Image: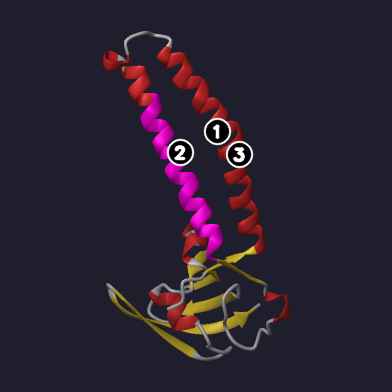
C-alpha cells in the first residue's frame, strides 16, 4: 500500500485550520501558562510548571502529527469520477442481506471515518468489499462476527 493519505479537500482545509490555530493561539497560550507557572517560584517542586510543560509537549506532538499527515495527503476529488462503480468518496445505499436492513455509507479515508455520520473507511472490511462493485452486485464483507452480504442498491 502507498504512503499516501487520501482525504477530501474539505478535510484538508479543516486540518490546516486546526494546525494554524495550534501553531499561533495554541503556542501563545502555552507560553503564557508556562510563564505563569514559572512565576510561582522553585521549578523543582512546581506541579503547575510540570503540567504546563507536559501539555506543551503533547501539543507539539499533535502539531508534528498533523504536519506529517498533511505531507502525505493526496486530495481526492470525486467530481470527475463516475457512479457506475463504488470508489472512494462514493455514497452507497446497500441492503444488508443478513438482516434485510438498508444502510447508507460514504467511503472515505480511515482518517475521516465516522460511523455516526455514515462515513466508513474504504480500507475497512465493509469498505473493501464494496469498492469496485456496481449497482445490483453483491458484496461479501468478512468481519469478526462472520460474513455480511450487501446488495448495492444505489451509488452516488
Q: What residue is rendered at 60% in x and 72% in y?
A: 89
Residue underneath mark 3: 21
Residue 55, percent from left and from top: 40, 32
Quadrant holding the N terminus: bottom left
Q: Is residue 92 above or below residue 132?
A: above
Q: Are marks 1 and 3 in contact (CB under 8 Å)?
A: yes
The residues tagged by marks 1 and 3 sit, at their Cα atoms, a distance apart of 6 Å
Q: Is residue 107 above or below residue 66?
A: below
Q: Are marks 2 and 1 in contact (CB under 8 Å)?
A: yes
Q: What residue is rendered at 72% in x and 75% in y?
A: 79
First to last magenta residue range: 52-72
**What type of secondary structure mainly makes up the magenta span?**
helix
**Label 1 element class:** helix
In magenta stretch: residue 53? yes
Q: What residue is rendered at 52% in x and 60% in y?
A: 112
Residue 108, percent from left and from top: 54, 68
Residue 100, percent from left and from top: 44, 77
Residue underneath mark 1: 26
Instruction: Using the image as rendered, state which of residue 61 and residue 42 is in the foreground.
Output: 42
Residue 4, percent from left and from top: 51, 71
Amino acid at each position: 500500500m502507498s504512503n499516501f493519505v487520501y482525504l477530501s479537500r474539505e478535510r484538508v482545509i479543516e486540518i490546516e485550520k486546526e494546525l494554524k490555530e495550534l501553531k499561533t493561539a495554541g503556542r501563545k497560550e502555552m507560553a503564557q501558562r508556562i510563564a505563569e507557572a514559572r512565576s510561582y517560584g522553585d521549578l523543582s517542586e512546581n506541579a503547575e510548571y510540570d503540567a504546563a510543560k507536559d501539555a506543551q509537549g503533547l501539543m507539539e506532538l499533535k502539531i508534528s502529527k498533523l504536519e506529517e499527515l498533511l505531507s502525505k495527503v493526496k486530495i481526492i476529488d470525486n467530481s470527475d469520477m463516475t457512479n457506475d462503480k463504488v470508489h472512494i468518496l462514493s455514497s452507497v445505499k446497500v441492503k444488508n442481506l443478513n438482516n434485510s436492513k438498508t444502510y447508507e455509507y460514504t467511503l472515505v479515508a480511515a482518517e475521516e471515518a465516522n460511523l455516526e455520520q455514515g462515513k466508513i473507511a474504504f480500507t475497512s472490511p465493509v469498505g473493501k468489499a464494496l469498492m469496485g462493485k456496481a449497482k445490483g452486485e453483491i458484496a461479501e464483507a468478512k468481519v469478526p462476527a462472520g460474513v455480511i452480504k450487501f446488495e448495492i442498491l444505489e451509488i452516488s
